[in-house]
Each structure stands twice: as C-alpha cells, then as structure tokens.
C-alpha cells in the first residue's frame, strides 16, 4: 500500500508542476512534425571523456598546453548503415579563433563488432572510449580496424592523419601513454582455435567449468561464458612489445569494461583495478550492502569484478596490490605531484580501522605508496558522489562532490600541516582563477547541447558549435520536468517526466514508465530517450533503443524515466521497484495526467527483470510492457549459468530444498501465470543462447495463450551487442518498441505494408485477451 500522506504530497507536487508549465507549453508543437526513429538516429551527439560510472575527465577536450581543443561528434547514417565520428579541432588563442573549428578526421564504423571479439565496433562511439593526449598535438583513442577489431588509433591534429598504433588480432580494451612515449595496453586473450571441434570429434567429458550458455554457443572446451573478458597486458616501448604479468599471471580475468587506469606524473607506475578470487580475511567487517553483494558475485565469477587496486611498474613490468582495502565503486584517485602518494575519495580503509567512514566506503585518505601508511582526511563523503579529486599543491587537495540527486554541489579543500590534514580556510589557499579561453558545453532538459568558448578574463562567450540547430524548430517534442519523492518504505525515487508534445491541461494521456537502474542526476542534460544520460548519450544513435522517450511524446504519450536510490541489494530489489512502479502510476493518475487504463512499463537490462517481476506480482492493471535483453534470476536461466550466487540472493536462497520454496514464490518463471499484461521480450546480446535463456517465461506465457512476443534484433546471431550502435539494429529495436507501446496504449498502427503480419498477430492477441481464462 502507498502511504496516503506521501501520495497526497506527490500529487500536489505534480499538480503544481502541471499548472506552472501550462503556459510555457501551449502551442509549442504548432507547425512541427513528429520525431521518427530515423530522425533521432541522425541527430548529433557530442562525446566527452567519461568513465563508466559518469565521472567526467576534463583532459579529453583541451590539449596539455591549453592552446587547442578537440571535439568528437557522432551521428548515424542509415544509408551507409554505419556511424560517423567527426573530430573537430580549433585554436584557443582568442574567442575569434576558437569560433572557427575545422573538420579534422571523418571516420565510419559499422557499429556491428567482430564475430570473435568481446566488444568491437559497437563500442567505437561509446562515451567511455577516452581521448588521450599523447602530447600537445597528438591524441589517441580506440577505433575498429577493417576487421572490426579495436586498435589504438592516433591522430595528429595539425595534419589530421589517422594512424593505427597497434595491430592486435583481438580487441584492445584500454590503454595509456606514459610521458616518455611508452604505451600500456591490455587486449582480449583469444580463445583456443578448434578446441571444441576436436572434442566433438574425439569424444569428451563435460568440464566442471562449463556452463549451459557457453555450450549453446558451441563452446564445449570448458571455457565459461565470461572467458571472452580474459585479457593480457603489454607495454610498447621503442617499437618493442613485451608482456606484463598481473599479480603473477599472464592472463588477467578482471572484466575490462569496468576498468579505470591512472598514471603517476612521472610515468613510472600505473594504477589499475583488478578482481579477486576470494574475499580476503577481515573484509566481512565492511558494512556496505553493495560491497558485500559484489563479494558474493565475485567469488562466483572467478575474480571478474574489479574490487582491488594494483600498481604496475612500467620499467620492470612488475605488479603488486596497492593495499589491503577494496576499491570504492565510485572512487576517484589522484597521484600527488611527486607521484609518491595517492588521494583516494571515497575509499574503504583496511580491516581493523575503527573509522566508521572507512567501513562504509565513505572516507577520504592519502596513501603513501612506499610505506603503505595512510592518513584519513577529515571529510565525510556519506551519500556524496565524488566528481573529481585534485592536488592543488604538494600539501593541498580539492574534492568536488554532489549529493545523490546531483545537487548541493560542494568543493572541499584540505591542507596538510605537521603530517595531519585539516579543512582549509579561505586564507589557506591562494589560488588564482584560471585565465585564457576554455570550452563549456551548455544544455538543459529542454535545450540541446551547444559548445561555447569562454574568456575567463572578460567573461565574454562565443558560440563554437551547435550540432543540432534545427531540432527544436522541426520536431514536436515534449516538455521535460524533474521530479523526486519518497516511497512508502522510505526509499527515495527520482524521475524525469516528458509531457505529451501537444499537452492540454485537464486531459488524461497514456503513460510509459521507463525504469533506470539506480542512476542519479548530474547536471541537466538534454536526452531523446528521456533519461539522465551519461555525457554524450542523449542524442545520436541511441544506447537505450527500447526506451523511446521523445518518440512516444511526439505521439502524445507521456513518459516517466524512474530510478530508485539506495534500493535493496539482493532480496528486496524487486520489491522496491514494484512499489515504485505502482506508486508513481497511482500518483500520476491522481494528478490528472495519466489514464489509469493506459499505463505501460519498459525495462532494459536489469530493469527488464524488474518489469517482469512487477507483472508477475502486482495487481495494478498495466496495459503493456517491454523487457529488453534482461537478466532473469528464474530457474532455467540460473541453471544455464551454473546457479549464479546473484540469483540465490534475489530469490532468498539456493534453488534447492527449502530454498526452492522461496523461488516458487518469487521467481518470475514460476509465477508467469499471473502475467496478463501484453509483454514484448527483446534479445540483442546473444543468439540461440539468448532465446533459450528467456525461454522459461516466454514458453509458459505462450502455453497459457497470453499476449507475449519475443523479438531478436537483426544479425544477433553473428553480431550480438548489449548496447548496439549499428543503425539498422537500433532502428529495428526502436520501431518494435514504439509500435508495441503505441498499439496497446492508443491503437495506433504504422501504415508500412511490411508490418501487416505484425499487426495481425497483435490483433489476435487482443482478441484472445477478451476471452477469460479457463
């Protein structure tokens, strides 16, 4: 049940927003046309350097000497069935010179990826594909070669000629240039060729390490499904390449897609994050539910999750663990100016530390790399998201953070005196404001990003680049507002609401709730999918193709992207999101915006499971739903993947004996008979194995004659991707999601003759729903 007082307050909040926004939205859509998937695909996004969890790296745009800038622009090309990346460069000598950027490099990627690599062309346009300045005129980044294998590419911004620096047979995952020119990089370890074929010929015994998912892919050689993440480290210096052992092993099993790299100022050592095979003694004292959950997952996946830091000596190639403490999931690291110590914020402290912040991963510390001794900084980072850490001098640091909503920005400066740190007074730090020209990307929830040059001395600004100058003038888009509140269980929710493009106060509209996994707000960013995207994800070829966002709003369907903060870990995650879906649906109905009979859910990846769980356990009459490429801790998928620890956590225990009774109550596969909502299931990260992995729920619903459809994107058997960037793959997902939601919420049908069979099936579904269950 929803707390009546919370419901009343949220209804009042939403009603007030509706009233305030009425005049601003009246007549906005006049003379404009609907936004189509092909239109959205062709829009341009600006990619800035950003790590996997949303922390921005400022060094990607401006050269080390501050004299040049480099912008990366991405847009889809349906005709070529690829994605273009344009490197645009300019001079920062003055506002006038900055205002004349010149095209430098024009690169095309298929966005498909290779058939042998873990991840290739689909990640070329990724916001985590970082730009590294090698010197004042050269940059390096990852790009796929003619075989769709990712290599390190370099470009001289004066000559604008691209050059592949590596020629690996498999993907390069990450890399870093040292000041003396050496290149540190890690590559995918290739699977042994022909091993499975020989076993089929000679006969074999199933290996203990085999899993059903891998066997469905034809791999019976004992390599598990995650073996594609095995990587090996190398250093390239003076033209020679030599391997580096990581903690005494040539193969590093850490998942490379979640890896951070840091380099000391002198280029002597690099800091990387690594997985651990077993939880070290004393680590059970850490109180973070997230960390304890990762420990269990990590032990079940052979050290894949990066939970510790390690140092690599770039001269000798030796490596060692940093200290006896886990890395914080959103931890920031900065080397001191002399490279002899590290600032870590937030961080856990080693076992035995009595500081409660260290047990919760909310401390800040300086760690001496030689002695291993550390000092705790007097700052509490509980419920703070650290955006950046910086050494202002050898004895002073700065930590920039926000709260979980991305608000309440705070800058903490600390100084060290007599070997102790203290918060700095204004008089302690005599810092001068930066001078010269710098770049700013300015945008809002309702205004697409533009790039400006700013003269810090005079305050004058100059528009440099408007990537989508006619977007607002051409298309009907819905107005966007931010909302937040609390659920009846005390958990906080945040959301972004897109109003129908032709919104009229007092009229009720269909509503789609898009689930977003624990994301928090940063600064306001313009997006077409409706979420609070990481940098560079809001336009261009979509990363979340099944979240139509403005593609629904342009058809006068409201869209709410919803996230629950600090939700339960393991058992209870599902309940938090079910409560959030039901509560927000009821609140938007009570506010007068949503039609209670036309509310749908959409979930991608982990969010898709929460959608399915809600449909199987909720009495709310959701009108339609999408579960896209999702994790499913039901019996069949868990069996295929060797009874994952995470599945036992989600369902309250192992799927055996007494634990199985809990699965019968909670697991979606065992409760599919309670799903009556039309459900579209989408697969994109696997072919046959993905179909079989989702078969439990799909086959049960189909047997019960419930409206369910499973759609697999084009070329998923040979070029699967969880985050596809190939235009035709994206377009196929977006059109299916859009058609499905529009059909069940408004009855609207696309006039394309190629879709007649699709609508024939769906009308049959609708007719079968009118017949009561036997």
Image (spheres, grey):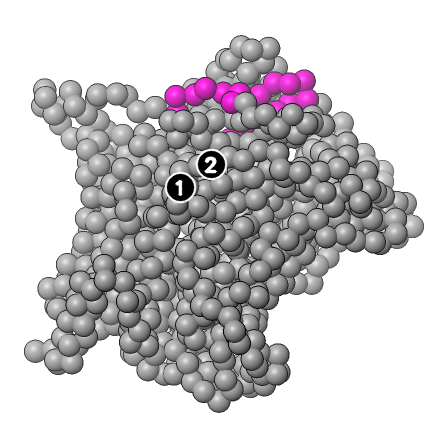
Q: Earlier in the sequence, mark 1 or mark 2?
A: 1
Residue 26 in view, yes or no? yes
Q: Nearer the viewer, residue 309 or 530?
A: 530
Residue 383 in view, yes or no? no
Taking the magenta stretch, the answer to whether it contains residue 172 is: yes
Say if mark 1 contacts mark 2, CB within 8 Å. yes
496 shown above or below 773: above
Mark 1 lies on a secondary structure that is loop
On the image, which quarter does residue 695 sit in? bottom left
- Give me the residue at 88% from left, 45% from top: 432
Q: Which residue is mark 1?
A: 80
State left or right for residue 458 relative to residue 2: right
Tell me the mark number nearer the camera, choosing from 1 and 2: 1
State left or right for residue 141 relative to residue 574: right
Residue 259 x, y percent position in the rendering? 51, 36
Q: Residues within 10 Å of mark 1 (few under 14, many from 20)?
A: few
Considering the image in quadrants, where does the C terminus appear?
A: bottom left
Mark on residue 108? 2
On the image, which quarter does residue 576 sit in? bottom left
Residue 682 x, y percent position in the rendering? 28, 55
Instruction: Find the distance from the CA under tag 1 to the CA under tag 2.
Output: 9 Å
Secondary structure mostly seen in the magenta stretch = loop
Considering the image in quadrants, where does the N terminus appear?
A: bottom left
Mark on residue 123? none
Q: Nearer the viewer, residue 327 or 624?
A: 624
């Amino acid at each position: 049940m929803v707390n009546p007082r919370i419901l009343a307050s949220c209804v009042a909040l939403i009603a007030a927003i509706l009233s305030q926004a009425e005049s601003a939205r009246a007549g906005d859509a006049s003379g404009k046309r609907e936004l189509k998937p092909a239109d959205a695909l062709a829009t341009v996004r600006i990619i800035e350097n950003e790590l996997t969890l949303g922390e921005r790296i400022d060094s990607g745009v401006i050269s080390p000497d501050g004299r040049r800038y480099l912008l990366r622009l991405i847009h889809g090309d349906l005709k070529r069935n690829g994605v273009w990346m344009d490197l645009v460069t300019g001079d920062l000598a003055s506002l006038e010179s900055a205002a004349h950027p010149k095209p430098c490099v024009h690169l095309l990627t298929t966005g498909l990826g290779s058939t042998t690599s873990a991840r290739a062309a689909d990640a070329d346009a990724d916001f985590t594909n970082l730009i590294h300045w090698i010197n004042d005129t050269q940059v390096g980044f990852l790009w796929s070669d003619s075989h769709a294998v990712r290599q390190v590419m370099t470009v001289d911004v004066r000559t604008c000629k691209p050059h592949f620096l590596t020629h690996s047979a498999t993907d390069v995952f990450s890399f870093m240039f040292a000041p003396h020119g050496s290149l540190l990089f890690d590559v995918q370890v290739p699977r042994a060729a022909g091993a499975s074929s020989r076993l089929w010929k000679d006969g074999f015994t199933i290996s203990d390490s085999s899993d059903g998912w891998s066997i469905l892919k034809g791999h019976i050689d004992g390599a598990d499904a995650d073996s594609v993440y095995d990587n090996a480290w190398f250093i390239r210096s003076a033209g020679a390449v030599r391997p580096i052992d990581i903690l005494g092993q040539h193969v590093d099993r850490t998942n490379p897609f979640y890896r951070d790299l840091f380099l000391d100022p002198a280029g002597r050592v690099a800091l990387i994050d690594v997985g651990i095979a077993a939880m070290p003694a004393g680590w059970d004292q850490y109180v973070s539910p997230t960390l304890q959950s990762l420990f269990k997952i990590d032990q079940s996946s052979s050290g894949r999750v990066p939970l510790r830091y390690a140092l690599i000596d770039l001269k000798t190639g030796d490596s060692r663990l940093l200290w006896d403490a886990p890395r914080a999931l959103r931890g920031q690291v900065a080397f001191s100016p002399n490279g002899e110590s590290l600032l870590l914020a937030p961080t856990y402290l080693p076992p035995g530390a009595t500081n409660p912040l260290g047990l919760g991963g909310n401390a800040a510390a300086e760690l001496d790399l030689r002695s291993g001794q550390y000092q705790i900084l007097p700052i509490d980072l509980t419920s703070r998201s650290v955006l950046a850490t910086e050494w202002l001098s050898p004895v002073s640091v700065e930590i920039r953070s926000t709260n979980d909503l991305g608000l309440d920005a705070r800058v903490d400066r600390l100084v060290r005196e007599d070997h102790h740190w203290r918060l700095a007074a204004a008089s302690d730090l005599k810092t001068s404001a930066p001078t010269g020209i710098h770049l700013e990307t300015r945008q809002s929830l309702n205004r697409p990003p533009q790039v400006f040059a700013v003269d810090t001395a005079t305050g004058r600004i100059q528009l440099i680049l408007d990537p989508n100058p006619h977007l607002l003038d051409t298309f009907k888009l819905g107005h966007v507002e931010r909302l937040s509140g609390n659920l009846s269980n005390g958990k906080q929710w945040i959301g972004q609401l897109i109003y129908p493009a032709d919104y009229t106060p007092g009229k009720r509209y269909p509503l789609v709730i898009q689930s977003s996994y624990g994301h928090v707000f940063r600064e306001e960013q313009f997006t077409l999918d409706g979420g609070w995207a990481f940098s560079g994800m809001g336009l261009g070829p979509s990363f979340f193709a099944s979240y139509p966002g403005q593609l629904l709003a342009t058809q006068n369907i409201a869209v709410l992207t919803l996230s629950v903060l600090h939700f339960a870990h393991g058992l209870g995650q599902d309940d938090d999101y079910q409560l959030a879906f039901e509560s927000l649906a009821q609140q938007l109905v009570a506010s007068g915006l949503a039609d209670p009979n036309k509310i749908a859910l959409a979930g991608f990846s982990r969010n898709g499971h929460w959608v399915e769980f809600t449909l199987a356990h909720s009495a709310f009459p959701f009108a339609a739903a999408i579960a896209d490429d999702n994790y499913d801790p039901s019996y069949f998928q868990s069996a295929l993947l060797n009874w994952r620890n995470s599945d036992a956590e989600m369902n309250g225990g192992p799927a055996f004996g007494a634990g199985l009774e809990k699965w019968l109550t909670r697991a979606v596969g065992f409760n599919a008979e309670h799903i009556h909502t039309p459900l579209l299931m989408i697969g994109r990260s696997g072919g046959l194995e993905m179909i079989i992995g989702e078969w439990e729920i799909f086959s049960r619903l189909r047997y019960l004659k419930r409206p369910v459809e499973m759609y697999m994107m084009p070329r998923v058997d040979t070029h699967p991707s969880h985050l596809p960037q190939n235009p035709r793959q994206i377009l196929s997902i977006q059109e299916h999601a859009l058609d499905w939601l529009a059909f069940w919420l408004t009855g609207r049908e696309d006039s394309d003759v190629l879709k007649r069979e699709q609508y024939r099936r769906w009308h049959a579904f609708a007719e079968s729903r009118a017949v009561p269950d036997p």
